[in-house]
Image (cartoon, helix red, strand yellow):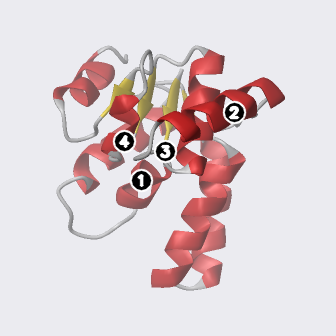
Amino acid sequence: MIVLDTTVLVYAVGGDHPLAGPCRRLVEAAGEGRVTATTTADAIQEFVHVRARRRTRRDAAELGRSYAELLSPLLAVSADALAQGLRLFERHPALGAFDAVLAAAALDAGAEALVSADRAFGSVRGLPWVDPAGPGLERLLAGAG
Protein backbone atom coordinates (compact mmCIF):
# COMPACT_ATOMS: atom_id res chain seq x y z
CA MET A 1 0.00 0.00 0.00
CA ILE A 2 1.22 3.47 -0.95
CA VAL A 3 0.41 6.54 1.16
CA LEU A 4 -0.06 9.81 -0.72
CA ASP A 5 0.80 13.16 0.80
CA THR A 6 -1.23 16.28 0.05
CA THR A 7 1.41 17.46 -2.44
CA VAL A 8 0.59 14.53 -4.74
CA LEU A 9 -3.12 15.33 -4.62
CA VAL A 10 -2.51 19.01 -5.35
CA TYR A 11 -0.11 18.46 -8.26
CA ALA A 12 -2.30 15.73 -9.80
CA VAL A 13 -5.09 18.24 -10.48
CA GLY A 14 -2.93 21.33 -10.79
CA GLY A 15 -1.77 23.28 -13.77
CA ASP A 16 1.50 23.30 -15.62
CA HIS A 17 4.18 22.07 -13.22
CA PRO A 18 6.97 19.49 -13.59
CA LEU A 19 5.34 17.30 -10.92
CA ALA A 20 1.86 17.37 -12.46
CA GLY A 21 2.54 14.49 -14.87
CA PRO A 22 4.12 12.08 -12.38
CA CYS A 23 1.45 12.79 -9.76
CA ARG A 24 -1.37 12.36 -12.30
CA ARG A 25 0.10 9.02 -13.41
CA LEU A 26 0.17 7.79 -9.83
CA VAL A 27 -3.41 8.89 -9.11
CA GLU A 28 -4.56 7.33 -12.41
CA ALA A 29 -2.79 4.06 -11.51
CA ALA A 30 -4.68 4.05 -8.21
CA GLY A 31 -7.95 4.73 -10.00
CA GLU A 32 -7.31 1.87 -12.41
CA GLY A 33 -6.43 -0.49 -9.54
CA ARG A 34 -2.83 -0.93 -10.70
CA VAL A 35 -1.54 0.33 -7.34
CA THR A 36 -3.13 0.33 -3.91
CA ALA A 37 -2.96 3.86 -2.58
CA THR A 38 -4.51 5.69 0.32
CA THR A 39 -4.12 8.79 2.44
CA THR A 40 -5.58 10.19 5.63
CA ALA A 41 -8.72 12.25 6.12
CA ASP A 42 -6.41 15.05 7.29
CA ALA A 43 -4.50 14.99 3.99
CA ILE A 44 -7.76 15.34 2.07
CA GLN A 45 -8.83 18.19 4.35
CA GLU A 46 -5.49 19.91 3.72
CA PHE A 47 -5.93 19.39 -0.04
CA VAL A 48 -9.40 20.98 0.10
CA HIS A 49 -8.00 23.93 2.05
CA VAL A 50 -5.18 24.49 -0.48
CA ARG A 51 -7.43 23.97 -3.51
CA ALA A 52 -10.07 26.41 -2.20
CA ARG A 53 -7.47 29.19 -2.14
CA ARG A 54 -7.07 28.83 -5.93
CA ARG A 55 -10.50 27.62 -7.04
CA THR A 56 -14.06 27.65 -5.73
CA ARG A 57 -15.03 25.95 -2.51
CA ARG A 58 -17.39 23.75 -4.50
CA ASP A 59 -14.58 22.59 -6.80
CA ALA A 60 -12.34 21.91 -3.80
CA ALA A 61 -15.03 19.95 -1.95
CA GLU A 62 -15.96 17.91 -5.05
CA LEU A 63 -12.34 16.96 -5.66
CA GLY A 64 -11.92 16.17 -1.96
CA ARG A 65 -14.89 13.79 -2.12
CA SER A 66 -13.49 12.19 -5.28
CA TYR A 67 -10.13 11.62 -3.61
CA ALA A 68 -11.81 10.19 -0.50
CA GLU A 69 -13.68 7.68 -2.65
CA LEU A 70 -10.67 6.84 -4.84
CA LEU A 71 -8.30 6.33 -1.90
CA SER A 72 -10.68 4.47 0.42
CA PRO A 73 -10.33 2.95 2.82
CA LEU A 74 -8.57 5.98 4.25
CA LEU A 75 -5.65 5.43 6.58
CA ALA A 76 -6.68 5.93 10.20
CA VAL A 77 -4.21 7.56 12.55
CA SER A 78 -4.02 5.52 15.74
CA ALA A 79 -3.16 6.98 19.13
CA ASP A 80 0.21 5.21 18.90
CA ALA A 81 0.90 6.73 15.46
CA LEU A 82 -0.04 10.16 16.79
CA ALA A 83 2.38 9.75 19.71
CA GLN A 84 5.13 8.58 17.33
CA GLY A 85 4.36 11.50 15.01
CA LEU A 86 4.75 13.99 17.83
CA ARG A 87 8.12 12.44 18.69
CA LEU A 88 9.16 12.75 15.02
CA PHE A 89 8.01 16.37 15.07
CA GLU A 90 10.26 17.06 18.07
CA ARG A 91 13.31 15.41 16.48
CA HIS A 92 13.02 16.67 12.88
CA PRO A 93 12.97 20.48 12.63
CA ALA A 94 12.20 20.44 8.90
CA LEU A 95 9.12 18.25 9.41
CA GLY A 96 5.85 19.99 10.24
CA ALA A 97 3.43 18.47 12.73
CA PHE A 98 0.98 17.31 10.03
CA ASP A 99 3.76 15.64 8.01
CA ALA A 100 5.27 14.04 11.11
CA VAL A 101 1.94 12.40 11.96
CA LEU A 102 1.46 11.29 8.33
CA ALA A 103 4.94 9.73 8.35
CA ALA A 104 4.19 7.92 11.60
CA ALA A 105 0.86 6.64 10.25
CA ALA A 106 2.62 5.33 7.12
CA LEU A 107 5.25 3.60 9.26
CA ASP A 108 2.58 2.20 11.59
CA ALA A 109 0.65 0.79 8.61
CA GLY A 110 3.76 -0.78 7.06
CA ALA A 111 3.34 1.25 3.89
CA GLU A 112 5.39 0.27 0.85
CA ALA A 113 6.01 3.97 0.24
CA LEU A 114 4.97 7.46 1.24
CA VAL A 115 4.94 9.60 -1.90
CA SER A 116 5.48 13.32 -1.39
CA ALA A 117 7.21 16.26 -3.02
CA ASP A 118 8.21 17.39 0.48
CA ARG A 119 11.85 16.43 0.94
CA ALA A 120 11.61 16.71 4.73
CA PHE A 121 10.21 13.16 4.75
CA GLY A 122 13.65 11.97 3.65
CA SER A 123 14.99 12.71 7.14
CA VAL A 124 12.79 10.08 8.81
CA ARG A 125 14.77 6.89 9.33
CA GLY A 126 12.95 3.80 8.12
CA LEU A 127 10.32 5.72 6.16
CA PRO A 128 10.16 4.56 2.53
CA TRP A 129 9.76 8.09 1.14
CA VAL A 130 9.44 8.46 -2.63
CA ASP A 131 9.87 11.78 -4.42
CA PRO A 132 7.43 11.99 -7.36
CA ALA A 133 10.20 13.62 -9.41
CA GLY A 134 12.62 10.75 -8.82
CA PRO A 135 13.13 7.23 -10.14
CA GLY A 136 11.38 5.71 -7.13
CA LEU A 137 7.99 6.69 -8.50
CA GLU A 138 8.70 5.04 -11.82
CA ARG A 139 9.71 1.87 -9.94
CA LEU A 140 6.41 1.92 -8.02
CA LEU A 141 4.47 2.35 -11.25
CA ALA A 142 6.52 -0.29 -13.08
CA GLY A 143 5.79 -2.78 -10.31
CA ALA A 144 2.09 -2.07 -10.66
CA GLY A 145 0.21 -4.20 -13.00
Which of the 4 image quarters holds residue 40?
top right
Q: Amino acid at mark 2?
A: Leu
Q: What residue is drawn where x is 67% and y is 27%?
A: 84
Q: Quadrant of the N terminus?
A: top right
- Residue 64 to residue 2: above or below: below
Tell which circle, 4 or 3, labels the residue nearer the N-terminal end.
3
Q: What residue is drawn where x is 45% and y is 38%?
A: 92
Which of the 4 image quarters holds residue 44?
bottom right
Residue located beneath label 2 in the image: 75
Q: Point out residue 71 in the picture as x, y percentages from the top left corner.
A: 61, 39
Tell which circle, 4 or 1, labels the residue nearer the N-terminal end.
1
Q: Are marks 4 and 1 in contact (CB under 8 Å)?
A: no
Q: Point out residue 69 in the picture as x, y percentages from the top left corner.
A: 68, 46
Image side of residue 109 versus residue 35, left or right: right
* Residue 7 numbered mark, or none: 1
Residue located beneath label 4 in the image: 120
- Residue 3 to residue 70: above or below: above
